Amino acid sequence: MSDPEGIGTLTGPSLPAHLYVHVPFCRLKCSYCDFFSVPVEDAEGVEAVLAGIEEEILEWGRARLSGILDTVYVGGGTPTIIGPGVIRILESVRTSLPARTDGEVTVEANPDSATARLVEALAAAGVTRVSLGVQSFDDEIIGLLGRLHTVEEAHVAARAVCDAGLDLAIDLMCGVPGQSLRSWHCTLEEGIETGAKHVSVYPLALEDGTPLAVAVGAGLVSSPDSDAAADMMLLAEDVLGAAGFERYEVANYAVPGHESRHNTAYWTGESYIGVGPAAHGMLDPETAGASGVRTGVGTDVARVRYSNASDIEEWLQGAGRDVETLSKAEVAREDVMLGLRLARGVGARIVAAAGLEEQLRQLEAEGLVELAGGGVKQRWRTTTRGWLLGNEVFRRVWLPDQ
């Protein structure tokens, strides 16, 4: 496990504390989505994937690594589209891997499949939070995005999650063609009214090959306006902040104490397991070797990333994982880059150890980052301008010579 804050060093192979399970099924692919997912077509196909996920989880259990899970995140796709299948996945995790009794267990859901009955079953199975893909509380925007729910269905699903005693997280999208600042303000206010304790705010990104990108390219839909998206991001910070939410990462807000532990693990360089077709994982070299992800790790390898096959048949047939290794220097840069995603920033001593102090000074001169605090608590963090231009900041940290 990575230790970017220098608190301590784990020795020997250890079970990562975080598990991501990818459920690749959706009722229909959204117009903007380029994540790996396929339409639900038949029960036989779903059963085959569920069995494959269970076997992959069991393989990690057979590795008998020391350690214990702290978070489990079931995403996709739309996990709730397979109904009780999600319960099967959680049961497989429970019986195959050691996990904390107070761990965080998240399941992604869409409003059209998050029924009260299913949400109650998730709560009984140990789920602690549901991440609901709302995207907008404007039916016209929902339609443009290719979503299958209505505003009313989003409210009904949100109530079901809260009534079951689970933490509610919602995703909202800004910078959508045709979306006005007023519509966005109403979406934020309605999001707050759902009782959500966590809100993710994402500006729309046009991904090549998606139906929305094709429509924009054909002139059927206007291009997203980056300036309008920035105004909406600023409005979100104001409106959510006034309601008691704090932005703790580039796109994520939470009522204090309700931050996503699982996603924070990604942003702080912790190891995690990825299970299911197209799932990604990140391991330390010792764990990678002990779990069979790869062998023969070199002496300068400090982090191992892997991705499962992005084809269900290939994955079911045991296709090998794609593996990428990072050197110690690359890990140091990555930890700084990831740390700058967080509102709190990254420790100045970590930046210095990565050899990036000069680069951060250049970004400071351009008004993109600032040095806050004093003594050993000094931290580099993005300014408001740097937050809005985050991709530029991250690129220059990762590729300091370009």
Image: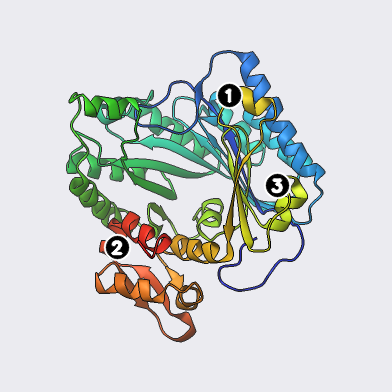
Q: Earlier in the sequence, mark 2 or mark 1?
A: 1
Q: Identify the mark at residue 276; answer none if there is no mark.
A: none
Q: Earlier in the sequence, mark 3 or mark 2?
A: 3
Q: Identify the mark at residue 294; answer none if there is no mark.
A: 3
Image quarter where the C terminus lies is: bottom left
Figure quadrant of residue 395? bottom left
Other residues around mark 2 within 10 Å, as few (<14) / some (14–19) / many (≥20): many
Q: Residue at the spot x=38%, y=52% of the render?
A: 251
Other residues around mark 1 within 10 Å, as few (<14) / some (14–19) / many (≥20): some
Q: What is the residue that sits farthest to the bottom in this orientation?
A: 375
- Cα separation between marks 1 and 3: 32 Å
Amino acid on which the number 1 mark rests in the picture: Ile
In the image, residue 397 lies at what x, y percent?
A: 40, 63
- Residue under label 2, please give it: 386
In the image, residue 182 lies at what x, y percent?
A: 18, 42
* Residue 68 visible in image: no
Drawn side of residue 31 relative to residue 101, left or right: left
Q: Residue at the spot x=66%, y=72% of the render?
A: 8
160 or 147: which is nearer to us?
147
Image quarter where the N terminus lies is: bottom right
Q: Identify the mark at residue 82; answer none if there is no mark.
A: 1
In the image, residue 61 lies at what x, y percent?
A: 78, 43
71 or 342: which is nearer to us?
342
In the image, residue 76 lies at what x, y percent?
A: 52, 34
Drawn side of residue 58 relative to residue 382, left or right: right
Q: Residue at the spot x=73%, y=52% of the render?
A: 296
Colour scheme shown: rainbow
Q: Earlier in the sequence, mark 1 or mark 3?
A: 1
Amino acid on which the number 3 mark rests in the picture: Arg
